[in-house]
Amino acid sequence: MQKKLIPLALCLLALAACKKKEEPAPAANTAKTEAAAPAPQPAPATPQPTVTLAAGAPIPAQGVALWLAADDAQPGKLASWSNGAVAGMTAKADAPEAQPEVIAKALNGHNIVRFDGEQNMLMTSIDISAARMPEATIFAVFSSKTAEKTPYRKLYGDDNGGYDRAAGLDDRAENNHNYTVFTGNGVQGYFDLEAGKTYLAAEQFTKTELDGWVNGKKMLDKIAAAWGASPDDALPNMYIGGTGTSFHEPWQGDLAEIIVYGRVLNDQERMQVEDYLAKKYGVTLAR
C-alpha cells in the first residue's frame, strides 16, 4: 500500500512546481523596469513680424515693427493710431476714457499725442517680450509734465511684474535718476528728466544687455539684462502711455513719435533715425 502512495505524492509535487513556473511576475517588478515618459517641451515662440519700408524712407528700411507719428492722427481724441508705411501695426484704446488727445502743431509745427496721467493708454499690436523680440531698438520723442518719481509713470512697457521692458519715471533706481528703464534685472536709472523738456531717447535691448542714448548722447553702456528662467513671461502686447494691464503707471505728458525695430541697429543706422527725429522736432543732439 505504501509503495502505491509514494508515486502519487511525487506526481502532485511535480504538478505544483509546474503551476508556480507559469505564474506571471508581480506588477511591482514591472513598474520598476518601465522608463519614465519625457516631459513635453513648450513650442518656441513665433518671432514678432517686422516689415521692410519702401524705398526712400527717411529711416533704415529693414526690421521695422512699429512706427507711429502724431502727424498721422487727426486732432481730438485718439481711438486708433497707425501708419500706412507699416501696414497692420496699430495702437488702440480699449475704452473711450483710455483715449489720449492729439494736439495739432504743438511741437516744432508737428502734432503730439497727450496722455492725461490718469486713464489714457494705448495697446499696440506688437509683442516686445524677449521671447518674441530677442533684440529690439525703441526710439521715442516725448516730454513729461512732471519730474516726480512717484507715482510711477511709464512711457511704454509690457510689464507683468517681472521688470519686463519698460521706460519711465520711477524712484527705485540705485543711482537716483528719475527716468528709468526696466532691464529684466531690476530698475536701471537712465537720466535726470526735467518737466516740460522734449527728449529723443533710444533704448537698444538684447536678451543679455541694454544700451541707451538720450539726445544723441550715450547714457547706458552694456547694462546687464537678465530675463530669468521665463523670458516669455511678459505681457503679450506693448503698451504706450503706460506699462500695461498689470501695472498701468499712466504717463502724464506728450509723445510725438515712436519707432520700434525688431533688431539691433548699428551706429550709423541709429544716428540716421536720431537725425531724422531731431530735425523734425527741433531737438538738439549732444554728440
Image (spheres, rainbow, N blue to C red):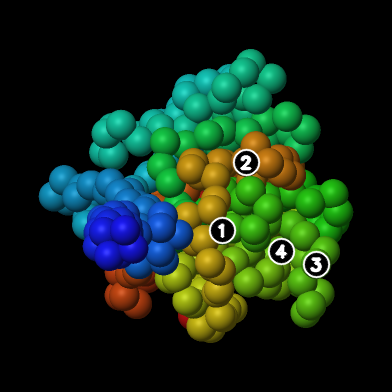
Callout 2 amino acid: Gly
Residue 215 is drawn in which quadrant?
bottom right
Q: Which residue is mark 3?
A: 172
Q: Residues within 10 Å of mark 2 (few under 14, many from 20)?
A: many
Callout 1 amino acid: Arg
Q: Earlier in the sequence, mark 2 or mark 3?
A: 3
Are circles 4 and 1 on residues that touch, CB within 8 Å?
no
Q: Quadrant of the N terminus?
A: bottom left
Callout 3 amino acid: Arg
Q: CA distance from mark 4 to mark 1?
A: 14 Å
Q: Which residue is mark 2?
A: 244
Q: CA distance from mark 2 to mark 3?
A: 19 Å
Q: Secondary structure at mark 4?
A: strand
Q: CA distance from mark 1 to mark 2?
A: 11 Å
Across and down, in percent, residue 241 comes to: 63, 41
- Residue extending farthest bottom: 221
Across and down, in percent, residue 59 comes to: 29, 57
Determine if residue 269 is in view.
yes
Q: CA distance from mark 4 to mark 3?
A: 10 Å
